[in-house]
Image (cartoon, rainbow, N blue to C red):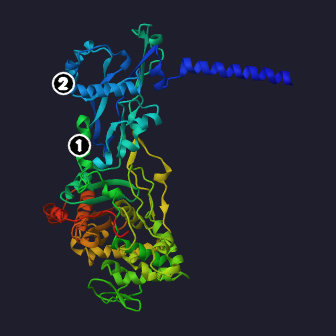
Amino acid sequence: MRKLLLYLIIISTGIVFITRLFYLQIYNTSFAALSEDNAIKVLYDYPQRGAIYDRNGKLLVTNQPSYDVMVIPRELKPFDTLEFCSILKISKKRLVKQLNKARAYSPRVPSVVIPQLTKDEYAYLQEKMRKFEGFFIQKRSLRDYYTVNASNVLGYIGEVNDALIKKDPYYLSGDLIGIDGVEKQYEKELRGVKGIKRIQKDKHNRDIGPYKNGKYDTLPINGKDLTITIDENLQAYGQKLMENKRGGIVVLEPSSGEILALVTAPSYKPELLVGRKRSPNFTKLYYDTIAKPLFDRGLKGQYSPGSPFKTINALIGLQEGVVTPQETFSCRMGYYYGRKKTRFGCHAHRSPLSMVPGIANSCNAYFANVYLRIINKYETPQEGIDVWRKHVMSFGLGDYLGNDLSAGDKGKIPDSKYYNRVSEFPKYKWYATRTISNSIGQGEVLATPIQLANMTAAIANRGYFYTPHIIKMIDGQPIQEERFTKPKYTTIDKQFFEPVVDGMREVFVQGTASHLQSKDIEICGKTGTVENFAIIDGVKTQLTDHSVFVAFAPKDNPKIAMAVFIENGYYGARYAGRIATLMIEKHLKGEIERKDLEDWVLSHSLEEEYAKPYSGEPFKINQ
């Protein structure tokens, strides 16, 4: 037995050594390992990056040729630095810096000296390359944009950094990678696979031909083309409506979760982040701390949701059995509570109101009553708030949605631990009225526009939603990922949605958006006016309110759901409501019939509002 074991050990060891030797000599195609091989010179043939199309097959992004000047430091021979710098229009100081950086990276591996030459620069230099031994020109691809919209969706590509090179051996110095948006999220699909050519070198480091007659060379594999869910025409129209305004528009298809438009304003033209001008342009955009064009407000803007959140409290009240659609509540210009009869204000409207007119007229007193009943149903306010929170989060609020977008924020739905921590009362002795602002989406609740659009889609579907996503097809094949094709259900039973939907329809019939109706379209929506605070000279100061609006249409079998958020836009129907109606018309009718609304939106600017001096962070308020 021991003799047999000894033979097995010897045989096993031999197999391991032979396998490793075979792997190193035949199959090891690691980019880094091949590049460091003294006897073999490795050249890369870069593939074409995949193109990007909109949902209707319209080309959004393709490629244009680019040429990088590369150097292999150990192959450098003395050359005329002044002539070289003159051709490339760079200083000798910069050239020396780049050469030192290349030597530090690797004396044998190619490094970029000057990236992204123009065609003219390339043609002129190519004629003189024989004079500069150790240098060569590497052909790559830069992005070529066929749209001036959706820069926040598409993202951009840039040069890999040292940390990424160490993390992923596929990338070498000078390689380009998706930095943001679709380019980042679907980098592996878009980038393709490099082709490899191996050149045999003699003992004098001279090229003597293809290694093993090119037996192990490979051709590049182009990246896969992507079709995204965006409707470029709708995206462009939304961008047009948002000129001279700040905020976001998110439009979803309720039946699939596909993102039809994702508008942030202000934005920038995608072409600004292409080529050698990318770095100075990016710096300029990055340091614009006022307009923040690189900040995607649709995905990352965390705001109090305002009155659209009342629809959620109505649904929770019905589910918890603390209110019926027919029950009415009185409103005396607000709701009064506590021993001091503190007033929770409201605007003028008829009273008393049941649920449908309560939604249509956006009555604060109605929803204060419903909310307090939800919390007080349970033995302690802590238990009540946690039950309430569970219902709210089932609509995709208060956490990441799990979409395929490269940016986003969680928003905030407070729980009992939060109030226990921040409450001014000892031993957790706070009451439901401590949190009463949550009843109208104006308390500690924060949501992003995409979360509000998703919430609206869940209401439109009467209780379920599909995870919002930007990808539609990869190389012509529809996506099949379960996370995008499987519906997610809320904690609210289907039968409770109809009175809320009816209330949202009445918003357009006789409520706060009755002047925004569109002929022949049953739009359901909810206006919102969100209080806006900033810190000025150390004092919390109220500024011009934000305008918010959520809507879906048609009422039955909805084709579109959306959220519009306009910073400092006054009240909900003023800017956000008008824009929502126009976007719905554009999508469902293909043309605009409410020219009066369009003319008003296009002729009004909020730049004067934004020019008012203040200090503070406008995106994260009421925390």
The kind of residue tagged 2 is Asp
Q: Alpha-carbon neighbours of circle 2 within 10 Å: few (<14), some, or many (≥20)?
A: few
**Marks 2 and 1 in Cβ contact (< 8 Å):** no
Q: Nearer the viewer, residue 507 or 280?
A: 280
Residue 214 placement, left or right of 592? right
Q: Quadrant of the N terminus?
A: top right
Above/below status of 8 relative to 264: above
- Residue at 42%, 75% (x, y): give it: 313
| Disc ID at residue 301 | none
Report helix, strand or loop for mark 2.
Answer: helix
Q: Could you say where residue 312 lies in the image, as x and y percent from the top left?
A: 41, 72
- Foreground: disc 2 or disc 1: 1
Residue 580 placement, left or right of 368? left
Q: What residue sits right under mark 1 in the picture?
A: 281
Between the residue at mark 2 and the residue at mark 1, the CA separation in whole angstroms equals 22 Å
Above/below status of 310 relative to 217: below
Query: As drawn, which residue projects farthest toward the right?
Result: 1
Q: What residue sits right under mark 2 in the picture?
A: 120
Q: How many marks?
A: 2
Ranked by sequence position, the earlier of labels 2 and 1 is 2
Report helix, strand or loop for mark 1.
Answer: helix
Q: Could you say where residue 355 lies in the image, as x and y percent from the top left?
A: 38, 81
Q: Could you say where residue 462 lies in the image, as x and y percent from the top left?
A: 43, 68
Q: Alpha-carbon neighbours of circle 1 within 10 Å: few (<14), some, or many (≥20)?
A: some
Q: Nearer the viewer, residue 75 or 69?
A: 75
The answer to whether residue 51 is visible is no
Q: Could you say where residue 26 lies in the image, as x and y percent from the top left?
A: 54, 18
The answer to whether residue 622 is visible is yes
